[in-house]
Amino acid sequence: MPQIHKSTIRRARQAERRHERNRSTLNAVKTLIKKVQSDVAGKKADEAKTSLQEAASAIGKAVSKGVLHRNTASRRISRLAHRVNALSGSGS
């Protein structure tokens, strides 16, 4: 049986902490995205715009923390913005 080094144990602990932190950030982002989608579904244009700003900010922070890739973030923000703009009638 191979030996387990102290550094391996430390790295496993660090990875576990990072995993929890990343999951919490991602869950917060998903919650804000769902709020935008529910506002769009409820035809609440003003609330959808403010929710979109909050979601875009959270997505940007997730990118800076390394939780999301920047292209994924851009795609999600773009899709949400397209739905909100279609709702408010200002085009795409």
Image (cartoon, rainbow, N blue to C red):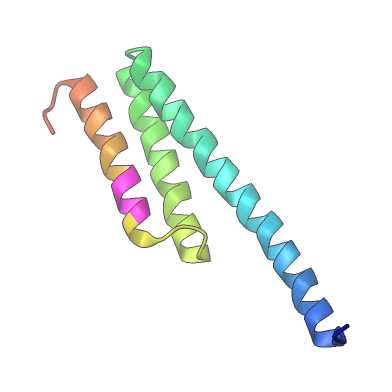
User: For the C terminus, which image quadrant?
Assistant: top left
Residue at the extreme front: 1
Q: Where residue 28 sits: x, y (%)?
A: 57, 42
Quadrant of the rendered structure where residue 8 is? bottom right
Between 59 and 7, the one lying in front of the other is: 7
Give the left or right position of residue 59, taking residue 12 as reference: left
Residue numbers of the magenta segment:
72-76
Q: Where residue 29 sits: x, y (%)?
A: 51, 43
Quadrant of the rendered structure where residue 19 is? bottom right
Residue at the extreme left: 91
Residue occupying the point 32% across, 58% down: 71
| For residue 75, above or below residue 61 | above
User: For the N terminus, which image quadrant?
Assistant: bottom right
Give the left or right position of residue 50, taking residue 10 as reference: left
The kind of secondary structure the magenta stretch mainly shows is: helix
Give the left or right position of residue 73, taking residue 4 as reference: left
